[in-house]
Amino acid sequence: MRFHIKSSIWITIALLALAASVLVSAGIGQTGFTPPWVVAKAMLQEGDGGFGLSLIVWELRLPRIFLAIFVGANLAIAGALMQALFNNPMAEPYVLGASSGASFGAVIAMVMQWTGGVAGFNPIMLCAFSGTVIATVTVYSFARQDGRTSIASLLLTGIAVSALLGAVTTLILLRSDFYQLRSALYWLMGGVAYRGWSDVAGILPYTFICGGLAFLWRHNLNILGQGEETAYHLGLSPEKARGFILVVASLLTAASVATSGIIAFVGLMAPHLARLLVGPNHGPLIPLTAIIGALLLVWADVIARTGSSGEELPLGVITGALGSLFFLYLLNLQQRKHQP
Amino acid sequence: MKTDSQGRCLIKAKGISAGYGDKTVLEDIDLRLHSGELLGVVGPNGCGKSTLLRTLTGRLAARSGSIQVMGQALTAYSRMQFARKVAVVPQADAPPFDFTANELVLQGRRPHWGFLSGPGAKDRAKALQAMQTANTVHLKHRSIRNLSSGEFQRVLVARALAQDCPILLLDEPTAHLDVGHEVEVFRLLHQLCRAEGVGILCICHNLNAAAAYCDRLVLLDQGRIKAEGNPQSVLTLEQLREVYAVDLSLTETPDGRGRPQFLYHCEDL
């Protein structure tokens, strides 16, 4: 019981930190810093109070903050799921090439200018999902040996699949016309700028439905994380588990890539930080990792929009720089642990 | 439940062969495991011991022959049903995630809780009991990554005990243990057979330990059963010379049971 209380406390703290981050970051922009209480007051006022602050906050800053929250949560949960699937704490949508798969699919849908959609999914989302599944299945089948994945084979296969899909994506973009190229490239670099509430509404169901499914599966994820053989002997059918995780993690990845491009390493950092706080049990881990992923992306986006004067930095660049250092540190840690 | 070594037949394998790709690893294996029996499987490296375990648990489909587990064909079991009948202690591997020993043992209760529900009070009690039996209670709150390999091995045994199955299969459970802990594990297995009537199949490399503690032995060589029966009849010097290509000296346990024990002899050094 002691551990449940500890986990609840951390989740509460993280939620409060997220709420505070929304208020504080809504006050940060190109125009400088506005204190949270002023922001809160402006938000509650119907009119703009003469400064236009209410409008800026409601229509420009809050949508991107909430988009950052849901994209961060999606990527973090997808990372935790993939780590359980590969029994390897280095697995993550970007590292595995799943993000490249999603962007590959999304670019095809964009360039072909497909419209319509099936069962409420728009074509970009459908193609991004298919791309993610193809990339993940490819990495899984090549990197897996005797029911386990070594770090080396995971990373090498991930690199190869990423490189291939990235190259094809670039080729497709180069063959398309200039207007598409520019907007697609900007989207590809990853970011939550210039998005509206409709984008938030688009990604929100994925976070809650897929996150909820992951949470329902928490006990099975714990067991799967012990390795396929152990899971098998404890009565969990590996095929069923693989299929489930693949679909849920791919939906999460595809939804975030389709709305905000490739944002690297959030799925690596968030679960790792969450494990440091509450341990590897997926019960508390899934909600906490989602909140931490959200926090990371909210603040990375603050850096993105204020870091260099005049022009915005792509969000993917910030998490890429931060995450790659984290990645190297984790790799070092893992290798030391695996030495006999 | 007190049972003699000729208890109920729990596993009945007839004429099974198995392999990977175009390589045949096991050929024409007949094997029975009874309740209350400690059956040892010995044989040189690469003789198919682990493949036998994979085949008996259905991880590897047998190419021919039939396997019955508690009167029902292996293939007719769902994963969950099977995990309530057969517990497995796999070879110890470095654990990827940092659970506590208690959490790991509790996971052994998984076949007894529902598909999406988690452990309850009864499961916690069973896990604790299993840890007591396997002498690992003092490790309860330790992280499994910080355990010695011997401690980790015993925690894996505790997890299999928590699973509460009539059949227990172990793949070299004493590979990383010093002689003290090795004796402890074998005494525990022996006691589980006698007191609880569990049928245990244990893959083992240490011939002396296998001969001393197992009721019956199967000697595998190149995927076939070379000999089967009580330790005295299976572990003869002649068999060992043929299978392991080694000359040893034979003596016996000083307990009056006459179990064979082997000594190295090094006159030629």
Image: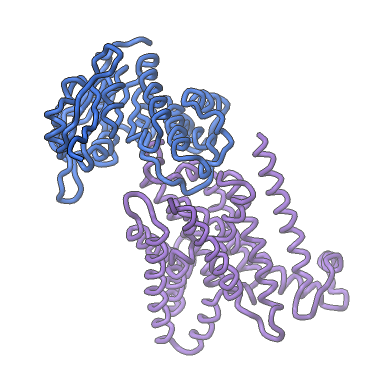
Chain colours: A purple, B blue
Residue at 66% of width from left, 81% of height from top? A312
Q: Which quadrant of the view contains residue A38?
A: bottom right
Nearest the viewer among A44 and A298 is A298
Nearest the viewer among B237 and A312 is B237
Whether residue A121 is visible = no
Nearest the viewer among A331 and B77 is A331
Q: Which quadrant of the view contains residue B9?
A: top left
Q: Left or right? Give the position of B246 relative to A76.
A: left
Residue at 74% of width from left, 63% of height from top? A21
Q: Quadrant of the C terminus of chain B?
A: top left
Q: Where's residue B208, x and y in %?
A: 28, 27
Q: Is residue B53 above or below residue A252?
A: above
Q: Where's residue A63, x and y in %?
A: 68, 69
Residue at 44% of width from left, 65% of height from top? A98
Q: Where's residue A178, x and y in %?
A: 48, 90
Whether residue A243 is visible = yes
Q: Which quadrant of the view contains residue A101?
A: bottom left
